[in-house]
């Protein structure tokens, strides 16, 4: 039996852990509370008899130390209903555990750069709607905790779409950030993509002018816009799908996705740009390789990341294309 707080009468009562009906939480189950009436999550956390400040409550949410039965991703404005059970783990989890919980992996870390492997579904950096659960924010918190200094932080060099998994590089100071961005065209950036259908040529170059509409959708135009150049190579055909290796010469938003969709070979799972299939329940695009000169030592740095298991499963039965 655990304590719970009833906002209606401001009294502490008891709750039986069996009321979770066998559902398991991903954190230590320190406190359970039952919601008495409809409200938002953040004010509810602050109202509990735990002495949580607004800042502390937000930290608990950011580190996924709060869970609500039958609800997935939680935000500060998540609506709670009467009868909802809120579980709170007091105490901040270790930084390594936080990264693992978000499937974020540090591939390389030194005094000037960090290379990570971002999972699909995680924003690379903050947006107007999401500022807490991002690769940038998680990496910042990790560096602050590991180095025991609030001054530690990561600086954004480039971005990956939320739906795309794979390698990203961050700088650890503004001088390194500026150096990497200045020489970004010299960085080798390769992706693996599984597309619908079979491209007519084994390799080639895609050139388009792209613009973004007010609805945030990118499309091709005959004149104006930004030039986008992508080199591709067909690695294998798998029935009605093909595995491509793509090398970026430019770095426009949604570049690979728009260029392939425009040639009637959308990336599997890319429902935004016309894909007809989504067997892996995710975009089949992965940032697989980064190669560059270290901004301080000038040493050659090369990082490779294989296809995630869910995408690799789509390629279990290769069917070579008939000539």
Image (cartoon, rainbow, N blue to C red):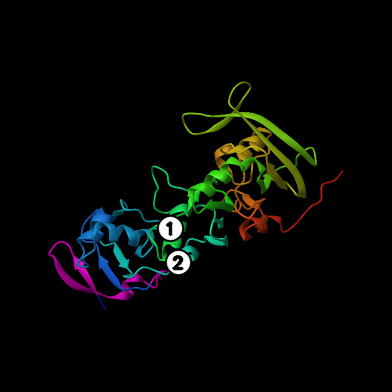
- Quadrant in which the C terminus appears: top right
* Image coords of residue 267 (percent x, y): 64, 43
Q: Which numbered dot is residue 146?
A: 2
- Tell me which residue sits at (63%, 46%) in the image: 268
Q: Which numbered dot is residue 152?
A: 1
The stretch drawn in magenta includes residue 214: no
* Image coords of residue 137 (percent x, y): 43, 54
The residue nearer to you, when weighing 176 against 20, is 176
Magenta segment boundaries in residue numbering: 3-27
Mark count? 2
Residue 2 drawn above or below residue 214: below
Q: Residues within 10 Å of mark 1 (few under 14, many from 20)?
A: some
Q: Looking at the rendering, which quadrant does residue 223 occupy?
A: top right
The residue nearer to you, when weighing 23 against 232, is 232
Q: What kind of element bears circle 1? A: loop
Residue placed farthest to the bottom in the image? 1
Q: What kind of element bears circle 2? A: helix
Q: Is residue 68 visible?
A: no
Residue 166 drawn above or below residue 275: below
Q: Looking at the rendering, which quadrant does residue 6 occupy?
A: bottom left
Q: CA distance from mark 1 to mark 2?
A: 9 Å
């Amino acid at each position: 039996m655990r304590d719970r707080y009833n906002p209606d009468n401001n009294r502490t009562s008891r709750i039986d852990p069996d009321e979770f009906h066998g559902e398991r939480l991903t954190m230590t189950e320190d406190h359970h509370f039952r919601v008495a009436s409809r409200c938002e999550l953040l004010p509810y956390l602050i109202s509990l008899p735990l002495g949580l400040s607004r800042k502390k409550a937000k930290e608990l949410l950011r580190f996924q130390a709060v869970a609500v039965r039958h609800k997935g991703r939680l935000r500060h404005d998540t609506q709670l209903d009467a009868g909802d059970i809120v579980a709170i783990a007091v105490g901040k989890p270790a930084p390594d555990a936080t990264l693992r919980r978000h499937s974020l992996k540090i591939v390389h870390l030194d005094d000037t750069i960090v290379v990570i492997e971002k999972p699909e579904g995680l924003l690379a950096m903050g947006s107007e709607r999401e500022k807490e659960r991002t690769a940038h924010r998680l990496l910042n918190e990790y560096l602050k905790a590991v180095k025991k200094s609030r001054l530690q932080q990561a600086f954004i060099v480039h971005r990956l779409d939320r739906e795309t998994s794979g390698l990203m590089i961050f700088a650890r100071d503004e001088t390194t950030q500026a150096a990497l961005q200045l020489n970004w065209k010299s960085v080798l950036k390769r992706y693996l993509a599984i597309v619908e259908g079979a491209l007519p040529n084994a390799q080639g170059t895609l050139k388009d002018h792209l613009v973004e509409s007010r609805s945030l959708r990118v499309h091709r135009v005959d004149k104006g816009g930004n030039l986008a150049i992508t080199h591709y190579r067909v690695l294998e055909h798998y029935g009605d799908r093909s595995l491509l290796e793509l090398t970026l010469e430019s770095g426009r938003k949604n570049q690979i996705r728009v260029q392939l969709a425009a040639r009637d070979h959308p990336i599997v799972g890319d429902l935004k740009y016309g894909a007809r299939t989504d067997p892996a329940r995710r975009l089949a695009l992965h940032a697989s390789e980064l190669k560059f000169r270290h901004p301080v030592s000038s040493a050659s740095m090369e990082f490779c990341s294989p296809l995630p298991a869910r995408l690799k499963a789509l390629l279990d039965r290769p069917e070579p294309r008939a000539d």
